[in-house]
Image (tube, rainbow, N blue to C red):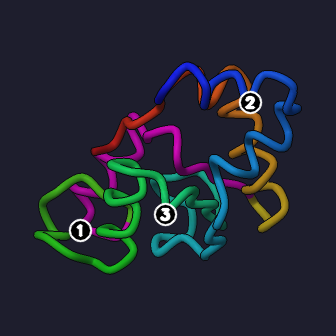
């Protein structure tokens, strides 16, 4: 990102920058009903965002070996591994609103676009 691009964002509120970073957000029910994730609903952020978006979209489309690769929709082992250390682009809650609030809270310290978050790739 160029210096000009960063200067453009300096006066923009965190809430607005979060919306740009996170949206579109998919809110979906957890395959395992919270057994591994500890919540009934998942908020999955930012499909348009580089490597992070590619990883989220790959998981939502169940691409790859979903039974063995760590992901929230895979087999018991894969889901357990995924939720032991989930990436910043996914959060859980007991309601759809709670999942979105958890996603915001989980990323409250990210100063996007000044901090590039591409985990989960």
Q: Residue at x 47, y 52 (%)?
A: 49
Q: CA distance from mark 2 to mark 3?
A: 20 Å
The residue stretch that appears in magenta: 73-93
Drawn side of residue 75 relative to residue 11, left or right: left
* Mark 1 nearby-residue class (10 Å; few <14, some 14–19, many ≥20): some
As measured in the structure, the alpha-carbon distance from the residue carrying label 3 to the one carrying label 1 is: 23 Å
On the image, the x and y values in percent for residue 6 come to: 63, 24
Using the image as rendered, state which of residue 80 and residue 54 is in the foreground.
54
Q: Secondary structure at mark 2?
A: helix
Is residue 51 rendered magenta in the image? no
List the residue tagged with mark 1: 75
Front label number (3 vs 1): 3
Residue position for label 3: 47
Q: Residue furthest bottom?
A: 61
Q: Identify the secondary structure beneath mark 1.
A: loop
Q: Position of residue 9 (x, y in %)?
A: 74, 30
Left or right of 1? Residue 19 is right
Q: Which residue is mark 2?
A: 9
Q: Secondary structure at mark 3?
A: loop
Identity of the residue drawn at 23% across and 68% down: 75
* Quarter that holds the C terminus: top left
* N-terminal label among 2 and 3: 2
Q: Nearer the viewer, mark 2 or mark 1?
A: 2
Q: Magenta span has 90?
A: yes
Q: In the drawing, does residue 12 fall left or right of residue 68?
A: right
| Front tag of 2 and 3 | 2
Q: Nearer the viewer, residue 28 or 4?
A: 4
Q: Quadrant of residue 23?
A: bottom right
């Amino acid at each position: 990102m160029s210096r000009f691009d960063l200067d453009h964002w300096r006066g923009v509120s965190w809430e607005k920058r979060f919306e740009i970073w996170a949206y579109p957000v998919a809110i979906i029910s957890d395959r395992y009903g919270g057994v591994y994730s500890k919540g009934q609903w998942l908020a999955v952020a930012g499909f348009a965002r580089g490597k992070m978006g590619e990883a989220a979209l790959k998981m939502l489309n169940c691409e790859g070996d979903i039974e063995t690769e760590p992901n929230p929709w895979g087999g018991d082992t894969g889901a357990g591994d995924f939720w032991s250390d989930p990436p910043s682009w996914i959060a859980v809650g007991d309601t759809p609103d709670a999942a979105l609030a958890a996603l915001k809270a989980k990323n409250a310290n990210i100063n996007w676009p000044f901090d590039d978050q591409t985990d989960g790739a």
